[in-house]
Amino acid sequence: MDRLRSKGKSRRRFRGPRLPVDPLKLTLTEAAGRQVQAAITAFERGKFEIAVTLAGAAEGMIQRDGYHLFAGLRDNTRAKERFEKQKDWINVLNREFYWLKHGGDDAMEIACFDAAMMIARALSKLEAKDWTPRMEEFREWFLKNLDLV
């Protein structure tokens, strides 16, 4: 906030939702989908920590049998050669998410790639029928730019 004021930009006052407001009733899939949508929006704005947090939460909400991106990464044969324990590899895959959730070191660098991968992981847990056009646009962007991210 102070950074915005120091640059001469004004900020909009907090207004909150229009009251009274009904509670939100969601299925797990709807809630996870909304979190992924918000993660994509945060990602576009360069707010990688928000994207990782929301996408990581969404990924954890959905249980899915069969292939999904995290399972593919977790079970990678090259990772099995590099890490004695699978838990150590999982900690690497979730490093930024765990730090944002639990803290730890005083600082953490969160790259564009980290946020993009977490969103891709969350999307892979959702059934294609539950994807929005925005999710599909992210997928197309991600595949097109994977080598640059």
Image (cartoon, rainbow, N blue to C red):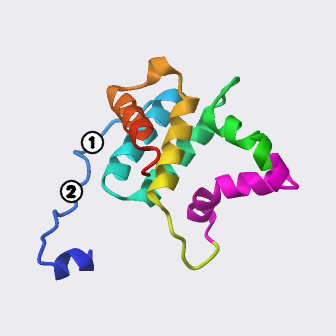
Q: Position of residue 133 (x, y in %)?
A: 33, 26
Q: Secondary structure at mark 1?
A: loop
Mark 2 surroundings within 10 Å by alpha-carbon count, few (fewer than 14), some (14 through 19), many (20 or more): few
Left or right of 73? Residue 41 is: left
Mark 2 belongs to which amino acid? Arg
Query: What predominant SS class does the magenta segment belong to?
Result: helix
The part of the chain drawn in magenta is 80-103
Q: Position of residue 48 (x, y in %)?
A: 43, 58
Residue 20: mark in rendering: 1
- As drawn, the residue found furthest toward the front would be 147
> Can I make out residue 34 in this image?
no
> Can I make out residue 130 in this image?
yes
- As drawn, the residue found furthest toward the bottom would be 6
Q: Secondary structure at mark 2?
A: loop
Mark 1 belongs to which amino acid? Pro
Taking the spot 25% from the left edge, 47% from the top edge, the residue there is 17
The reply to whether callout 2 and callout 1 are in contact (CB within 8 Å) is: no
Q: Position of residue 84 (x, y in %)?
A: 88, 55
- Residue bearing the label numbered 2: 15
Mark nearest the camera among 2 and 1 is 2
Observer-nearest residue: 130 or 76?
Answer: 76
Observer-nearest residue: 124 or 11?
Answer: 124
